[in-house]
Amino acid sequence: MVSERQMGMLVRLAAQVEFFHGLEPHEVAKIFSKGMTQRITKGETIFLKGTTGNTMYVVLGGKVGIFDGRKQIAELKQGAMFGEMALTTHEPRSASAVALEDSHLFALNETTFERLLTKRAAVRILLNIIHTLSRRLKEANAKLKEIG
């Protein structure tokens, strides 16, 4: 359970996180109260490529590496979200996630997310996820053009 003091800190931090943009502080607090925060130590695997999952994550502190095999394909810092496709596709993870340093994560599983879907906050979160996915697709397309 998150203390009132911790909740205040989480709500302030959420203002810097794209996943929570457009949400009122009381909506952010409600989401944090439904989800779970996790402390992950450097080198700890969060999930492996090929496994199925039903949880997405937001980096609240620290760094997380996204790996395809041994090759690091992304470094995620405070405010980044990852694993969000698990909430919708139910397909195996396309990459592995490993803590590059001691990290603090917010985890939201599918069951909790579905409970939130009836709320205005969930609509805002879905729009934030769509925005993030669109940006990533645009970046991937730009890299493909560079390659050739």
Image: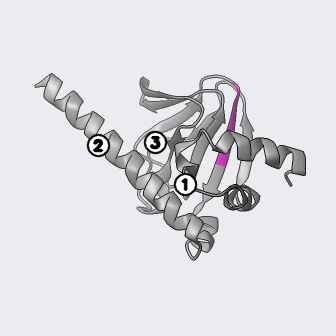
Amino acid under disc 1: Gly
Residue at x-position 70% and y-position 26%? 102
Residue at x-position 58% and y-position 41%? 17
Q: How many marks?
A: 3
Quadrant that contains the N terminus:
bottom right
Which mark is on residue 6? none
Residue 87 location (% of width, % of height): 50, 60
User: Magenta segment, which residues?
Assistant: 102-106
Above-or-below relation of 106 to 91: above
Depth-wise, is mark 3 or mark 2 nearer the camera?
Answer: 2
View extreme (left): residue: 148
Q: Earlier in the sequence, mark 3 or mark 2?
A: 3
Residue identifier under label 2? 137
Above-or-below relation of 78 to 146: below
Q: CA distance from mark 3 to mark 2?
A: 20 Å
Amino acid under disc 3: Lys
Residue 15 location (% of width, % of height): 63, 43
Residue at x-position 52% and y-position 58%? 125
Residue 53 location (% of width, % of height): 53, 55
Front one among 133 and 45: 133
Q: Earlier in the sequence, mark 3 or mark 1?
A: 1
Residue identifier under label 1? 22
